[in-house]
Amino acid sequence: MSPPAAFPWREAMAFGLGRLGWPPEHFWAATPRELAAALRAWRREAPGGAIERSAFEALMAACPDR
């Protein structure tokens, strides 16, 4: 049996820090499961396109991380 593949840190950092624009402290505080969820959400194309900024801010206020 071969060992599991190494975690793709280069790609994860490029996505979290680059594509998503997370500051380093947010990236390093995220779990691999949270990063994977963000990647799935980013890849999925919503039927209506991106949500409006006000709707996103309301969602963040309703569901704070901390």
Image (cartoon, helix red, strand yellow):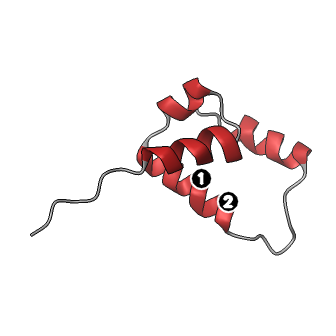
In contact (CB < 8 Å): disc 2 and disc 1: yes
Q: Disc 2 to disc 1, how far (Cα)?
A: 6 Å
Q: Where on the picture, by quarter, is residue 41?
A: bottom right
Identify whether 48 is placed above or below 8: below
Q: Which residue is mark 1?
A: 38
Q: Which mark is residue 42?
A: 2
Q: Position of residue 38 (x, y in %)?
A: 59, 53
Q: Which mark is residue 25?
A: none
Residue count near mark 1 (Cα–Cα under 10 Å), binned few <14, some 14–19, many ≥20: some
Residue 36 visible from this viewpoint: yes
Q: Residue at x 73, y 39 (%)?
A: 60
The residue type indicated by label 2 comes to: Trp
Q: Position of residue 26 (x, y in %)?
A: 58, 30
Viewport quadrant of the C terminus: top right
Q: Residue at x 16, y 60 (%)?
A: 3
Q: Secondary structure at mark 1?
A: helix
Residue 66 visible from this viewpoint: no
The residue type indicated by label 1 comes to: Ala
Horizontally, residue 25 falls left or right of residue 5, namely right
Q: Position of residue 53 (x, y in %)?
A: 89, 45
Q: Secondary structure at mark 2?
A: helix
Nearest the viewer among 39 and 64 is: 39
Toward the top, the furthest residue is 25
Horizontally, residue 2 falls left or right of residue 22, namely left
Horizontally, residue 26 falls left or right of residue 6, namely right
Identify whether 13 is placed above or below 46: above
Q: Residue at x 77, y 70 (%)?
A: 46
Viewport quadrant of the N terminus: bottom left
Horizontally, residue 30 falls left or right of residue 43, namely left
Identify whether 34 is placed above or below 43: above
